[in-house]
Amino acid sequence: MIEINKEELVERFMRYVQVDTQSDPNSNAYPTTEKQKDLGKILFEELKQMGLSGVEMDEFGYVYATIPSNSDKKNIPVICFCSHVDTAPDCSGTNVKPLLHKNYDGNDIELPDDNSQVLKRSVSAYLENHIGADIITASGNTLLGADDKSGVAVIMQAAQYLMSNPSVKHGTIKIVFTPDEEVGKGTAKIDMKKLGADFGYTLDGGEAGSLEDETFSADGASIIIHGVIAHPGYAKDTLVNAIKIAGAVLETLPKNEWSPETTEKRQGFVHPVSINGIAEKATISFIVRDFTTAGLTAHHERLKKIAEAVVSKYKGTTMEYVQQEQYRNMKEVLDKNPQVAAYAASAIERSGLKVKTESIRGGTDGSRLSYMGLPCPNIFTGMQNIHSKLEWIGVSDMMKAAETIVHLSAIWEEKA
Ligand SMILES: [Zn+2]
């Protein structure tokens, strides 16, 4: 029976969310904002106090720590738990005031600092699962930061549990807290050698029981159109304007399918994200998304064909099609190491939950880590309405997430 200390976990989470750790997409520094280290320093001190070894925060704001093995077995793979300390730039993270609503009664919750912010059961159906239990919201002016300080708090609480309950046998367990996940740089400066783990888990997911082992595969694509230039006063029958051709290409794209606004679940899409140019030369940039590499290839072929058909109607013009790889579906790596997700599923079940295997229509640090040699699915923490003022989390979900970490640590030891 694993009993996670609820008061400690809640106190921890409420304290971490009050530290402003918003990352900045326009910064070229590492970390993108120095203030992320404010939380890093707190975690560093607390990990040391708990007695973990190799506790370190580096110049980039990554915090590393090790829970030493307490098992006689020598062949246990080293696993790692990971979450990010930064909050999203979409919504203020300054002066977060977390509110603990004990015994949530099921009514709508008007947030005190801005009464236009109302958390409603009719919109946030998952609240249903938490009636009679404790939930935490922000106060109306900011996000809560459960994404991903719930992950941080849950990992810290599980570490505390493992350190003080030696009867739970486990191998070497690594912990890493990363900066800048929300601006796509969470793994930019991670030291895989220092981390030294074989398999990992991010704690950065939603509903209790959810296990995400699949992400989009992602490419970028650029269509570069070369027009024909002439002095506009003497351009009759000569000038062909590249910007107008770019407009024609966009107009030709399907309207009822193949875009973010018309697709869901396992459907892929192409999405123009920027256009820039002059009469002589115009570039349209796209993101291309699918769950399979083959699907990506098909999207590229289709997009290229559409563009070529348009451009070929204009005499003297040419186009180039350039594709860039961005990240790949972690499933391609995880399928080669099926025990990683399977053990996570068993751990979730041991915590008394039903496993919900899900795929993410986006990328995670886990997808990058998976391709950096650390197969890394994503485990729930309970976070809801992320990146918004209506963000909230159920305390019992966080408790189950911490319990899942403890079970998972034990399962790797048992199976070795
Ligand atoms: Zn997150």
Image: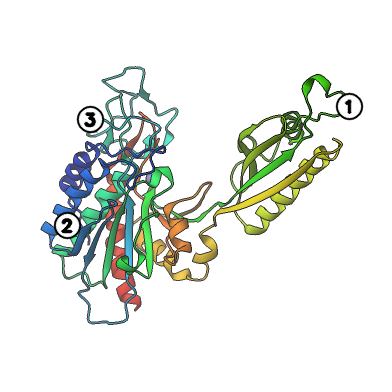
Image quadrant containing the N terminus: bottom left
Residue furthest right as drawn: 237
- Taking the image as shown, residue 243 lies to the left or right of residue 336, namely right
**Which quarter of the figure has residue 168?**
bottom left
For marks 2 and 1, the one nearer the N-term is 2
**Residue depicted at x 80% and y 19%:** 233
Q: Give residue 64's position: percent from left, percent from top.
A: 25, 60
- Taking the image as shown, residue 364 lies to the left or right of residue 113, namely right
For ligand 1, the image quadrant comes to top left
* Eye-nearest disc, 2 or 3: 2
Element type at marker 2? Answer: helix
Measured Cα–Cα span from mark 2 to mark 1:
73 Å
Q: Which mark is residue 47?
A: 2
Query: Badge 1, how many Cα within 10 Å: few under 14, some, many 20+?
Result: few
* Eye-nearest disc, 3 or 1: 1
**In the image, what residue type sits under mark 1?**
Asp
Element type at marker 3? Answer: loop
**Which quarter of the figure has residue 191?**
bottom left
For marks 2 and 3, the one nearer the N-term is 2
Q: Which mark is residue 306?
A: none
Q: Which mark is residue 237?
A: 1
Query: Badge 3, how many Cα within 10 Å: few under 14, some, many 20+?
Result: many
Which residue, given by chain and number where applicable, does mark 3 sit on?
97
**Residue depicted at x 27% and y 43%:** 36
Q: Nearer the viewer, residue 161 or 97?
A: 97
Residue furthest top as drawn: 115
Contact between labelled residues 3 and 2, with CB atoms less than 8 Å apart: no
